[in-house]
Amino acid sequence: MEVFDAVRTVLAVRSYRPGPVPGDVVRRIVEAGRLSGSAGNVQPWHFIVVEDRSTLGRLGEIMTTGRYVAGAAFAIVVAVKKDSLYAVSDTSRAIQNMVLTAWAEGIGSNWTGFGPLPAVEQLLGIPETHMALAVLPFGVPDAKLGLGRKKRKPLGKVASRERFGAPFS
């Protein structure tokens, strides 16, 4: 899938088919996060891949905005270094790279939570130097999704040329 096609068509997926995702696909998704740009190349992230069914179930209980984590094939808990000024910005880039890479592979995802997530930190033994920022469930979408059917404001409402409010077109 071309990059723009992935951006144009990616949708939040909250329901997954049972079964695992191939290991090479999981690795590519994590690599997409690792290879993300980072201010000063600090790379203030740590990715915890969770495939254990009981741990996924516990994450689903913790994530009140994403109980569906429990039904995912796997999840990536994204932790950030607390002392990094650009941690949230850099790690958000990594999260988007992982979501888009997954989508290009036919794997759906969605960002759940927004740190701090102390119960997740305790569950996974995340050290005091880090904060859990997000939990990303991944899996094959349970339903056929309408690729590209997004409800977005027109480009002219969210973009300007040269000065705020100047028509983009």
Image: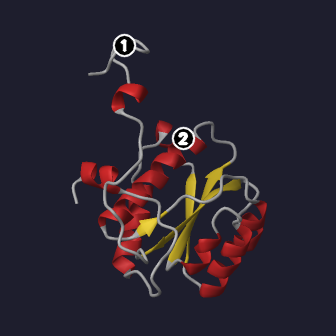
Q: Nearer the viewer, residue 85 or 164?
A: 164
Where is residue 55 drawn, in percent x and y? 66, 81
Q: Is residue 42 visible?
A: no
Q: Is residue 121 left or right of residue 101?
A: right
Q: Nearer the viewer, residue 28 or 107?
A: 107
Query: What's the distance in space between the residues labelled 2 and 1, CA to CA?
Result: 28 Å
Where is residue 145 drawn, in percent x and y? 36, 67
Q: Is residue 70 visible?
A: yes
- Residue 134 lies in what quarter of the image? bottom right
Residue at x 45% of width, y 82% of height: 17
Q: Which residue position holds label 1?
A: 166
Q: How is the image coloured?
A: secondary structure
Where is residue 37 drawn, in percent x and y? 42, 44
Q: Which residue position holds label 2?
A: 89
Residue at x 56% of width, y 80% of height: 71
Q: Nearer the viewer, residue 145 or 125?
A: 145
Q: Secondary structure at mark 1?
A: loop
Q: Residues within 10 Å of mark 1 (few under 14, many from 20)?
A: few
- Residue 113 lies in what quarter of the image? bottom right
Indicate which disc, 2 or 1, sits on the residue closer to the N terminus. Answer: 2
Total numbered circles: 2
Residue at x 44% of width, y 52% of height: 96
Instruction: Identify whether 128 is placed above or below 86.
Output: below
Residue at x 45% of width, y 87% of height: 19
